[in-house]
Image: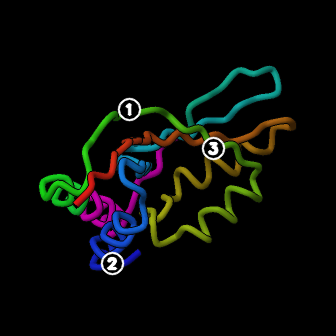
Amino acid sequence: MPRESVVDALNTIHRALRPNGILLDIHPLDVPSPVSALFADQTSNPIGETFYAGSFAGDVEAAERALAVQETQGHYANEQQTEFDFLHHFTLDQWHTYFAAQANDYRPLGAELTTAVDHTMQTPGTTLTMGERIKATRYRARTS
């Protein structure tokens, strides 16, 4: 969503929510995402990390600022917040498809990581995992 649309979306959501309705904001944090090989015997081996592109991180920061403004204006109250790790599982084809589709959200994958992934995935029964740090916040809509 374009940055300028975030405030409009939050206003629309606030108008659509019933009094005391809940807005759940879930988004990744701008921290490195570890990539590992998970072998058939359930052992794992770290391969490298992926990183979000600056533009994606900027969009997330803009959304957080917009929510903070909405909270300051009394539209929402932050009730609870948590962070957790979300683990993606990929075959080699899924890995390549995912990063082709999400190319604008991530920094380009380096040759070293790409080579390591392609080499590691030659082992039968291996899957790739990529961990993302996620922040989830529950907001309560306040009546205006």
C-beta proximity under 8 Å, tags 2 and 3: no
* Residue of label 3: 88
How many numbered callouts?
A: 3
* Residue of label 2: 5
The answer to whether residue 17 is left or right of residue 62 is: right
Magenta-drawn segment: 48-64
Q: Amino acid at mark 3?
A: His
Q: Nearer the viewer, residue 76 or 32?
A: 76
Q: Percent x, y for residue 17?
A: 42, 60
Q: Is residue 18 magenta?
A: no
35 shown above or below 84: below
- Quadrant housing residue 10: bottom left
Does dot 2 land on a helix, a strand or a loop? helix
The answer to whether residue 105 is left or right of residue 97 is: left
Crowding at label 3, few (<14), some or many (≥20) Cα neighbours within 10 Å? few
Q: Nearer the viewer, mark 1 or mark 3?
A: 1
Q: Amino acid at mark 1?
A: Thr
Give the Cα distance between marks 1 and 3: 19 Å
Question: What is the quadrant of the N terminus in the image?
Answer: bottom left
* Residue of label 1: 82
> What secondary structure predominates along the stretch shown in magenta?
helix
- Give the residue drawn at x 57%, y 42%: 130
138 shown above or below 1: above
